[in-house]
Image: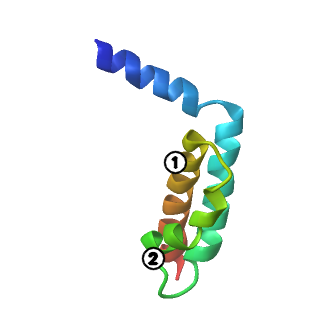
Amino acid sequence: MDNFLALMEGFSVAMQPIYLLYALGGVLVGTAVGVLPGIGPAMTVALLMPITYSLDPTAAIIVFAGIYYGGMYGGSTT
């Protein structure tokens, strides 16, 4: 039962509006870079890592996830 409560706490943190905006920004930037030929999702995350230096750790991980999935989507369009 403790695992379920921890999962629900994680969702409650991730669903805060500021973190959803960070995710949206990460997806948009990740898609814009992922559309370039030859750049996959992992390369996109590596290239955009300096964006997250000034963020708190939770926001940085959320931005990384958004960049990764945006890069996957951008790579599928090329």
Q: Can you say whether 8 is above or below 42 in the image?
A: above
Mark 2 in CB contact with mark 1 (< 8 angstroms): no
61 left or right of 22?
left
Question: For mark 2, what is the residue?
Answer: 40
Q: Residue at x 57, y 49 (%)?
A: 60
Observer-nearest residue: 58 or 18?
58
**Residue placed furthest toward the top:** 1
Q: CA distance from mark 2 to mark 1?
A: 18 Å
28 left or right of 2?
right
Q: Residue at x 55, y 46 (%)?
A: 62
Q: Residues within 10 Å of mark 1 (few under 14, many from 20)?
A: some
* Image-quadrant location for residue 4: top left
Q: Residues within 10 Å of mark 2 (few under 14, many from 20)?
A: many
Q: Residue at x 49, y 76 (%)?
A: 75
* Image-quadrant location for residue 48: bottom right
Question: For mark 1, what is the residue?
Answer: 61
Kind of residue sitting beneath label 2: Gly
**Helix, strand or loop status at disc 2:** loop
Q: Position of residue 46 (x, y in %)?
A: 50, 70
Q: Position of residue 67 (x, y in %)?
A: 55, 61
Q: Can you say whether 61 is above or below 53 in the image?
A: above
The first of marks 2 and 1 along the sequence is 2
4 left or right of 31?
left
Q: Quadrant of the N terminus?
A: top left
Kind of residue sitting beneath label 1: Ile
Q: Residue at x 58, y 52 (%)?
A: 63
